Amino acid sequence: MKKMDAFEKELTNCERRLRSFAMRLYRNPTAADDAVQDTLCRALANRSKFESGSDMMAWLGAIMFNAMCAYRRRNDTKRTVYPGALDYADHVAAPDDPHRTLEVKQALELVETLPTKYRNAVLAASLELTGEDMVAEFGCTLIAARKRLHLGRKLMNELTGAVA
């Protein structure tokens, strides 16, 4: 059996967190598992691009997020970047609390109504992506990414009648 080097050990250590991130992105266990495997394969293939001492999880998360967005752009421009969000609501809410499940579904439906650039910014922020990650993903300046997030949140508040 081949010994793992430091890079492979760090990949293995990040796998559980990467799977959690994939579930938040894909909202589907099968798709999340596929995304984790794809991300790990891409990371191994591009290990020379990883800067030693950098945050491995941030690098893996960026690989996964970029691959998911590229896939969605190629295959379905009408759907949201985050597929199956409404199906996943039953898993994120308490199963014994139907009121909470309804709230989650309503919030996800509200997010689905936002214009694409605002929806993507709000969902990216909910996934705890940094401003720099949003800049890389959206191909805009940090100020533009923050403005999209601000306007997306403001629009959601207006749609719900909440006071900002």
Image (cartoon, rainbow, N blue to C red):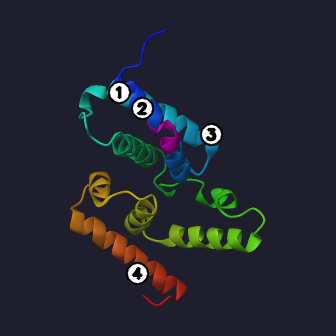
Total numbered circles: 4
Report how far apart the C-alphas of labels 4 and 3 lie in the structure.
34 Å
- Left/right placement of residue 153 relative to residue 53 reads right
> Callout 3: few (<14), some (14-19), or many (20+) C-alpha neighbours within 10 Å?
few
Tell me where the magenta segment starts and ends, as one range: 14-18
The secondary structure that most of the magenta stretch takes on is: helix
User: Residue at the spot x=58%, y=41% of the render?
Assistant: 31
**Residue 154: assigned label:** 4
| C-alpha distance separating marks 2 and 4 | 38 Å
Q: Where residue 87 is drawn, which disc sits there?
A: none
Q: Residue at x 41, y 19 (%)?
A: 4
Q: Which mark is residue 7?
A: 1
Q: At 40% from the left edge and 81% from the top edge, which residue is drawn?
A: 154
Where is residue 162? Give x, y as percent. Answer: 50, 88
Q: What numbered label is drawn on residue 30? A: 3
Q: Give how far across and how far down residue 89 sits, in percent.
A: 65, 61
Say whether marks 2 and 1 touch (CB < 8 Å).
yes
The reply, left or right, for residue 142 in relation to residue 58 is: left
Which numbered disc flags the more N-terminal residue, 1 or 4? 1
Report, in whole angstroms, how far the alpha carbon at label 3 lies from the one at label 2: 20 Å
The type of residue carrying mark 2 is Leu
Badge nearest the viewer, 2 or 4: 2
